[in-house]
Amino acid sequence: MKGSGWDVAVVSGTGVERQVRNYGNVRSCLEYQDYLEAVAALKEGTVDAVIMDRLDALNSLKRFGGNDLKLVGERLTDRKGRAVFRPGDDMLCLQFNKALLELIRDKTYEQLSVKYFGVNLLDNKNIKKPLLMDVSIRDIRGADESWAEIQKKGVLEFGIMVNNPPFCYYGQDKRLTGFEVELTEAIAKKLGIKYKLVVMERREAYDALIKGRCDAFLYGTNSINSLGGKVVYSEPYYFSGAQLVVLAESPINGPETLNQRIPSFKSLLRRRMIKW
């Protein structure tokens, strides 16, 4: 802290810029488009703290070493990764949820999570057992045909957003790789079916789903109604949100430190005179 307040970098997309500017002990709020540039500014001493997505923060710690950085305080926002399915494709969503839970139980999910983020993203999270998990779909009255159609087609087509490491990106061999790529592969293996990745932009994912270009897509969102409630969402496959990151030796221990007002010199002098 230099002078009277903290200098804070906020990475675009976290949605907390206005909130941070209103904190009582923040002198400046600088917006960065790239979280790596924000982390570099933190290490160089240009800013005192960075607010960025938790998963980006974990990725930074894993890629560049976490001895000089730390994540502090509770998340300022709540964001979850979910698979999104067409309206009415409840049985297909159920199968995804079942496969995800099995990956959690056999530690496959944890292995993938640690590989890309250094921690288990679902550690200590209560992932609900999918309803009707132990019931055959043939025994469910009124079950839709979404899963049966996928089995008949023989392949599950997943929409995925590329150029978003470590979730999905092109490796040195020019092949798609990343956390979501390997998770999709593991889900398909559990389901006993082939899979195909359909590369798309985030803004076109909903239309691609509705028009049948893919059977589902992976999507991180702050609200389950962000797509208008017209789709079917899976159980979360990660939890994230805006996270405060500081240097290891920083006295900042959470958002409350940034919001704690420092009394002015006159105020301190007045209090001292009252005591006298």
Image (tube, rainbow, N blue to C red):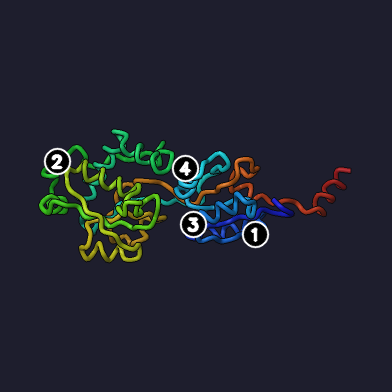
Q: Are there few (<14), some (14-19), or many (20+) residues within 10 Å of tag 4?
A: some
- Per the rendering, the mark at residue 14 is 3
Observer-nearest of 120 and 247: 247
Element assignment for label 3: loop
Kind of residue indicated by mark 1: Ser
142 sits to left or right of 205: left
Q: Earlier in the sequence, mark 4 or mark 2?
A: 4
Kind of residue indicated by mark 2: Ser
Q: Earlier in the sequence, mark 1 or mark 3?
A: 3
132 sits to left or right of 128: left
- Per the rendering, the mark at residue 28 is 1
- In the picture of the structure, the residue carrying the numbered disc 2 is 136
Q: Nearer the viewer, mark 1 or mark 4?
A: 4
Kind of residue indicated by mark 3: Thr
Residue 197: % across, % down: 25, 55
Element assignment for label 2: loop
> What is the distance, in whole Å, between disc 4 and disc 2 at their CAs?
41 Å
201 sits to left or right of 154: right
Residue 210: % across, % down: 24, 64
